[in-house]
Amino acid sequence: MEIETYEINKDTCAILNINNEVSKIIENEQEYFLPKKSFEVMEDSCAYYGSSFDGRLKGTKMILGGNYKLPIIVEESNSIIFFPTNGTNNEKCSWISLNKVEKYEPKGGYTKVTFFGGKSIVLKITCTSFELQLLRAARLQTLLNRRAEM
C-alpha cells in the first residue's frame, strides 16, 4: 500500500530505503511504500514527537560519544529507538527498531533479521556490522533507563 505521510510508532519495525525516492515501512501487521527517503521519514518522525533529528543526534553523541552511524531516540516515553544500517548520507541506509529485533543471523554475507511477530528481512550488511549497531542502540537505551531511575 502506498501512503503519503508516516510517523514512526510503537508498531514500526523498519524503514527500508528502496532508492533515493522511496522507502518501505515495515510494521507488525502492515507494510507501506512512502515516496520519501528513509532519512526524511526519520526527520519527520523526530519533528512529530517534538524534536529535530539534529537535536536527537546531538543528544546521542553526548550520551554515547562517537559520530558515525549513531542510534536515534525517536520517542523516549515508549523507548522508540532506531539504528541505521549505513551512514545516514548513504542511499542504502535503512533504519531498524531496536525493540522489534527478535534475532539475526548471517545469510550469504548479508544479515537476516527476524522481528517479533515473525516478519523477516535480509539486509545488505554483514552480521558483525549489524550486531555492532544493535549493541550501540542497546547501550543507549540502558544509559537512558539508568538516568530515568536516578
Image (tube, helix red, strand yellow):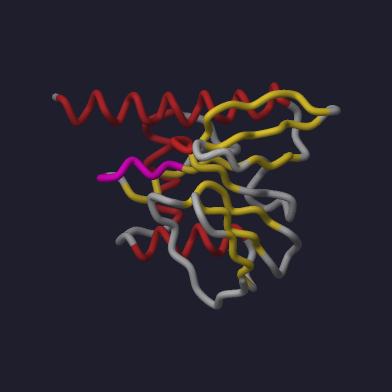
Q: Is residue 73 above or below residue 63?
A: below
Q: In the image shown, does 45 or 123 lie closer to the viewer?
A: 123
Q: Residue furthest bottom?
A: 4
Left or right of 31? Residue 110 is right
Q: Quadrant of residue 143?
A: top left
Looking at the rendered image, the quarter that the C terminus falls into is top left
Q: Quadrant of residue 22?
A: bottom right
Residue located at (53% from left, 62% from top) = 41
Q: In the image shown, does 146 or 31 lie closer to the viewer?
A: 31
Residue located at (58% from left, 30% from top) = 133
Q: Is residue 126 above or below residue 79?
A: above
Q: Give the residues in magenta.
A: 77-81
Q: Main secondary structure of the magenta part?
A: loop
- Residue 52 x/y as whole percent: 40, 59
- Residue 116 x/y as whole percent: 50, 36
Looking at the rendered image, the quarter that the N terminus falls into is bottom right
Task: Examine the structure image and report whether residue 119 is included in the region drawn in magenta.
Answer: no
Q: Quadrant of residue 3?
A: bottom right
Left or right of 69? Residue 21 is right
- Residue 60 x/y as whole percent: 41, 38
Left or right of 58? Residue 85 is right
Q: Is residue 23 above or below residue 109?
A: below
- Residue 46 x/y as whole percent: 40, 58
Task: Examine the structure image and report whether residue 78 is included in the region drawn in magenta.
Answer: yes
Residue located at (64% from left, 34% from top) = 113
Q: Residue furthest right?
A: 108
Residue located at (45% from left, 46% from top) = 57
All told, the count of numbered labels is 0
Q: In the image shown, does 63 or 50 lie closer to the viewer?
A: 50
Left or right of 122? Residue 138 is left
